[in-house]
Amino acid sequence: MYHLVLNDPRILLGYKNTIVYVALGTLLSLSFTAMGAYALARKNLVFGKTFMLMIVFTMLFSGGMIPTFLVVKSLGLMNTIWAMTIPGLISTWNLIVMRTFFQGIPKELEESGKMDGLTDIGVFTWIVLPLSKPALSTIGLFYAVGLWNNFFLALLYLRDESMYPLQVILRNIVMAGQYSDAQVVSASGDEMIVEESLKYATILVSTLPILMVYPFIQKYFVKGAMIGSVKG
Amino acid sequence: MIKQVMRDKYFLLLLAPVLIYYVIFKYVPMFGIVISFKNYNLFKGIWDSEWVGLKYYIQFFTNPDAFELIRNTFLLGAYKLLFGFPAPIILALLLNEVRWSIYKRFVQTVSYLPHFISVVVVAGMLTLFLSPTIGFINDVIKAFGFQPINFLMEAGWFRTIYVASGIWQEAGWGSIIYLAALTTVDPQLYEAAEIDGAGRWKRMLHVTLPGIAPAMVILLVLNAGQILEIGFEKVFLLYNPATYETADVISTYVYRTGIVKGNFSYGTAVDLFMGVISFIFVFSANYASRRLGETSLW
């Protein structure tokens, strides 16, 4: 059964696509979130209040599905790897959590860095980031899981089957019952049972990576939820 | 001013990608809402399409489906709040009574897990479990001699399935915040209650519950603000034309009419109408939580 699932070219392709989206997306999202959050964590940043207000306002109101769709389309992002990574680049929630974390870093450390002649970016890169590994891994994991599970962006912005991530292929197999020809032929025996097991096997294969790493990284997730519960 | 900008130039540089993202993907679409007042045509573009005023809003409100869509969106949210809000509290209270810490940690780990499973997998599992031919739930029903129920094809079952699976997925994760609140309850209060002769039940009622009451109030208010935020994905994956009458919500309708059929202006009008109502909900909820306690979204 697993042999059938793992040899399905669509599953392999979906796996490959998803891994690429997760790797690129997490890298971009995490870097930009950390950079932005560090700037916003600064107490007297010029226009800081205005920027924060502008960012938080998007939690309350958005242009909606169609205007966003038209923007993505007019930028030519449809059917590209960027469609999966850019429209959801920054999660406002994660940005605020990260900012709260940076606000807790003692000012003295940053000042000592400046005394040693570092620029603000140097302080961020060489002093703040190494101290923030726990927060970075937590937020990175949130982004990675979000990208791994993402179905919405693919549904809206990907039309080309060769770009489909695992979630879309999973949905096509499990919910809509599409099989590749090889499976139909080799599965013609006890059809009902085979169909059922195939679906279960597909679900398991696509969830396995999360199930396997989850017990080890669980504490990071919980920490993230706790930081988020404290007001920034 | 210029002096401050110069002083903070590196910070502004670090912030630039975030700001550009918010402008392009959040604020430009907000201005894109004007297409709901125009007869938007892909080839003419936003500026050259002609104005039609409130045509699409009137079209939506005179549509016989409008009432059903608004009702479905509201009811799904209301049931989610009604049943989904107490679930993590009950779980946290139960976990708090567990004395064997290995067992407690095990239950916590297992109950947080569904939060990380994708909506597609949850919907897929529901489809398999509830199937009238191969689903184990119907096997049980058949074993008792009843007719199998085709759950996902019957409109009457949709809300139950939606709410119950939501609780399964989020109750554990939601309990984290209550468990954190519980650790702040002073142990001396428990000792005092015990000396006064309170049993476990009484202690839970008079010490534990008041201890987490502030967290409960804040979360209730914030959840109430989110009442219209029905996740598009789960409804989209679980509904079908046979269950539209209870399952079709604003976001799925916008997707079908706007994106799939290409009525961009009409879809945007429907979406904006709901967005405004939702904004009022979140805004008043946040105002309320600011009055009630120190916690608020901003």
Image: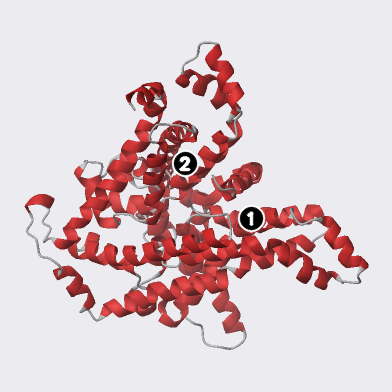
- Image vertical order of residue B58 relative to residue B213, above or below: below
Q: Chain of mark 2?
A: A
Pinpoint residue A68: horizontal percent, then vertical percent: 27, 51
The answer for how far apart the CA atoms under marks 1 and 2 are is: 20 Å
Q: Residue furthest top?
A: A117
Mark 1 lies on residue: B177
Q: Please, what secondary structure does the residue beneath circle 2 have?
A: helix
- State the SS at label 1: helix
Q: Quadrant of residue A116?
A: top right
Q: Residue at x 40, y 46 (%)?
A: A53
Report the quarter where the N terminus of chain B lies.
Answer: top left
> On what subunit does the disc labeled 1 rest?
B
Q: Nearer the viewer, residue B289 or B119?
A: B289
Residue drawn where x is 55% and y is 45% of the image: A209
Instruction: Identify the amino acid type marked 1.
Output: Ile
Can residue B297 be seen in this snapshot? yes
Residue type (three-letter) at the residue carrying disc 2: Leu
Residue where numbered disc 2 is placed = A95
Residue A195 makes an appearance in the image: no
Q: Nearer the viewer, residue B264 or B58?
A: B58
* Picture layout, residue A44 above or below residue B99: above
Image height check: is B17 above or below A196? Answer: above
